[in-house]
Amino acid sequence: MQRTMKAAAIAEIVLGVAVVLVICYLAKLVLVTLLVSVLLAFMLEPLVALLKRVRIPRSIGALVAVLVLLGACWGATYFFYSSAVSFVHDLPSYSQKVRGMISPVVKQTKDLKQTTDKIIPSATEASKKAVPVKVENTGTTPDFVTKNVGMVTEVALTLSFIPFLVYFMLSWLDHGRDRTVQLFRPDLRSNAFTALRQISVMMRGFILGNFIMGIFMSLISTVVFGLLGLHYFYFLGIISGFLSLVPYLGVALAIIPPLVAGLGTLNSTGLLIVVATVLGLHVFSLNVLYPKFLGKRLQLNPLVVTLSLLIWGWIWGAPGLVLAVPVTGAIKIVCDNFRPLERFGEWMGD
């Protein structure tokens, strides 16, 4: 009887997790928008708290914080727009340089193929006898344009809710926290309050730690790229520094922009310095800065981090890679504060 009840409980947990993942997949756009709003609200909360100390009401402080956020976004867009447009405009020349560099490899590949065809003529004859298959595009251009315009409009409309969500999350923070705690049974409300407080501390530490690491890597990259004479060094330095924060894939993403921009302008030594700078900063941040600013707050083992990146990246795509770590960290905090889930929290811990 006890084994049957235990099996039923495990089956309910597995079914519940499966249902939650399906909902996360189907409601991808809404949930990503909501979670981005939550991260922004945690990032702006210190400013609202500071304004509240000088007797400014929370509603006005939240409005000021949102306006500061929108102003910062507009300023960053205005500052980097011309550099981004110029960089994109120069991409064709970079691609030509890349083709010129790999043309010897392509030629050797063709020569190897011709040699292989001479040695194994049957493969060539079989390819000549193959029946060509013509694939026709059944869709029309207007249908394609209409479909993509509708998708872009839907994304833009959903993302336009972010400033409003951030404002209401900031202005109704105390009310929302109290009402959330009230949703639990009286004997669990203390655990719920503790979990919410720990999640808040973890989120702020996550945002602050990543911001400090991004600024550090951006400054060092900008200085090195500038000394090398790399075009758009200030733009590429910031892009490379913050791209390096993406877990696991960050180092590859951070190398590509400066490496592409350096083709044709830098010699082999300069390109090696670019690669060594990005790799060195990534390794230093991962082994020194990350444990100092984030390790104690997240307390997730590498296996769980890897699985979370795989799962949330599959469900939400690129935004999932950015949100995977804080979402998984919040799940661990919930598991740590509720007795039936403590074992799961211990398994996720470092």
Image: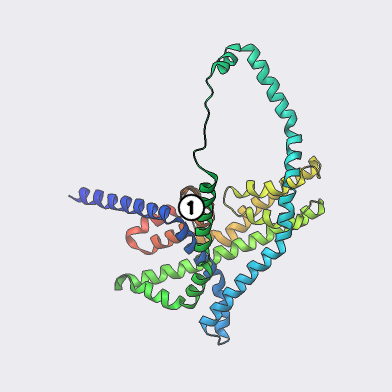
Q: Quadrant of residue 74?
A: bottom right
In percent of width and height, residue 240 lies at: 68, 53
Furthest residue toward left = 1
> At 51% from the left edge and 57% from the top edge, which residue is drawn?
323
> At 67% from the left edge and 63% from the top edge, which residue is drawn?
77
Viewer-side residue, 202 vs 142: 142
Residue 118 falls left or right of residue 35: right
The total number of labels drawn is 1
Picture colour scheme: rainbow
In percent of width and height, residue 343 lies at: 36, 55
Question: Mark 1: which secondary structure?
Answer: helix
In percent of width and height, residue 197 lies at: 45, 70
Q: Is residue 109 in view from this perspective? A: yes
Task: Please tell me how crowded label 1 is: few (under 14), some (14-19), or many (20+) other residues with Cα within 10 Å.
Answer: many
> At 63% from the left edge and 67% from the top edge, which residue is drawn?
73
Viewer-side residue, 163 vs 350: 163
Q: Is residue 221 in view from this perspective? A: no
Q: Quadrant of residue 81?
A: bottom right
- Whether 105 is drawn above or below 47: the answer is above
**Type of the residue with mark 1:** Trp
| Disc 1 target residue | 316
Residue 255 falls left or right of residue 38: right
Furthest residue toward bottom = 55
- Whether 244 is drawn above or below 64: the answer is above
- Whether 107 is drawn above or below 350: the answer is above
In percent of width and height, residue 342 lies at: 36, 58
Residue 74 falls left or right of residue 93: left
